[in-house]
Amino acid sequence: MTLKEQVTEVLDEVRPALQAHRGDVELVDVLEEEGIVKVRLQGACHGCPMAQITLTMGIEQVLKERIPEVKAVQAVE
């Protein structure tokens, strides 16, 4: 399984929690050599004051725990 496929699988598990708050996350890119995952927050998550916390304490933390190759998650517009 590629790194992108692993990330997609984990994001699919996280997505229901975001959708419960009328938000979502879209996978934009995975920079495999750097271990960076780029995502776009959508819906209510986009522009939310808590978006950075959702990104780092939610999405990034879960991805790092489940996939050791992931070093960081970045939000893109």
Image: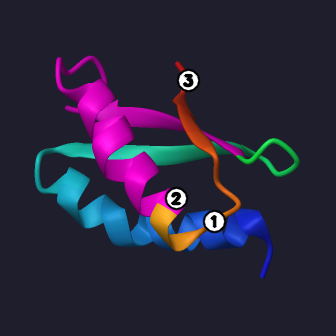
- Look at the numbered discs 2 and 1 and tell me whether their residues touch, using CB distance below 8 Å: yes
Tell me, yes or no, whether the highlighted magenta stretch contains residue 54.
yes
Query: Position of 16 compared to 40: left or right?
Result: left
Residue on which disc 3 sits: 76
Q: Amino acid at mark 1?
A: Pro
Residue on which disc 1 sits: 68
Residue 76 drawn above or below residue 23: above
Residue 37 drawn above or below residue 48: below
Q: Position of residue 67 (x, y in %)?
A: 60, 68
Q: Which mark is residue 40?
A: none
The Cα–Cα distance between marks 2 and 3, rounded to whole angstroms, is 19 Å
Q: Residues within 10 Å of mark 2 (few under 14, many from 20)?
A: some
Circle nearer the viewer, 2 or 3:
2
Depth check: 26 or 49 in front? 49
Query: Position of 63 compared to 57: left or right?
Result: right
- Look at the numbered discs 2 and 3 and tell me whether their residues touch, using CB distance below 8 Å: no
Circle nearer the viewer, 3 or 1:
1
The quadrant in which the N terminus is found is: bottom right
Depth check: 69 or 12 in front? 69
Q: Amino acid at mark 3?
A: Val
Residue drawn where x is 37% and y is 72% of the image = 13
Magenta residues span 36-64
Q: Residues within 10 Å of mark 3 (few under 14, many from 20)?
A: few
